[in-house]
Image (cartoon, grey):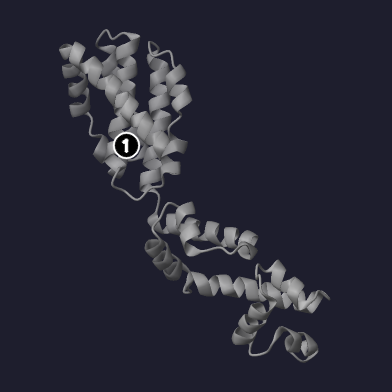
Amino acid sequence: RAEMSSYINENKLNSSYNWLIDDQFFQHQSLIMDRIDLNAVLKRGSRDDILKTVNKIIDELESVDLNREKLYVVLNNLILESFKIIKDLDYRVEDLLEIINKEKIEKINSENLKEIEIILKEFLLRLHDLISFNPDDKNQQIINEMKEYIAANYQDGITLSEMARKFNLSSGHLSNLFHEETGESFSDYLNMIRLNKAKELLKTTDDKIYQIADQLGFNDAYYFSSWFKKLVGASPTTYRDNINLL
């Protein structure tokens, strides 16, 4: 998040300075922005519309004699304008940082309009794909990633707050989302994963109860036994002794 803010603030300052020293350039850049509707193209347009929009931008730039510095300003302001369009949408900062290739933009020979065309098309197409991504698919992707993380780290005392920080969502929103997508609460799902693992270890190993408790992330074997009995109706020892009867 800090990296994104730094990038935006840095380029806002650079852009503002250049606009002030060249009123004609400011007017021409404003004209370019007026002739293209990034908001509509990104949110409702097709990928072909994106390509046509970039071609229109390049045509506008070719019609005037802009030096490298001014072309660089145009490129950055188009990117900043694109981010403004989606700033109120619920996207993770990581998603945006993956889309913008800051290094490529900084190294570009901005007098080469073909390079600018390629970078703009790549950037705007990826941004368009992110915005037009089906929210249900996005939510399912988050839940799938959560399940994978839980399966790999269930023994580490995972909390909903920890998961919310990982996905840059509020705990309340993530809790509701998880329940909507799975039909279970986060805590119930986590308990189910740990319980299934406990049953597996009781069935397939000769490990002591305290060893199994430790493998599942329980610091207290007595608490583990109480937790297990509450969910299964029998203590771990009784469950193991009667395994063949189950």
Position of 93 relative to 161 (above/below): above
* Percent of width and height locating residue 132: 36, 47
Give the residue furthest to the right: 206
* Percent of width and height locating residue 182: 48, 70
Position of 19 relative to 45 (above/below): above
Q: Is residue 227 left or right of residue 18?
A: right
Looking at the image, which is closer to me, 207 or 126? 207
Task: Kindly identify the residue that appears in the image at 79 percent across and 88 percent down.
Answer: 241
Q: Is residue 34 left or right of residue 169?
A: left
Task: Kindly identify the residue that appears in the image at 48 percent across and 56 percent down.
Answer: 142
For disc 1, the neighbor class at 10 Å (few under 14, some 14 to 19, many from 20) is some
* Percent of width and height locating residue 111: 38, 10
Quadrant of the image containing the N terminus: top left
Task: Kindly identify the residue that appears in the image at 32 percent across and 15 percent down.
Answer: 71
- The amino acid type, in three-letter code, at marker 1 is Phe
Task: Kindly identify the residue that appears in the image at 69 percent across and 87 percent down.
Answer: 235
Element at label 1: helix
The picture quadrant where one finds residue 54 is top left
* Percent of width and height locating residue 94: 45, 42
Residue that label 1 marks: 83
Counting labels gives 1
Residue 126 seen in the figure: no
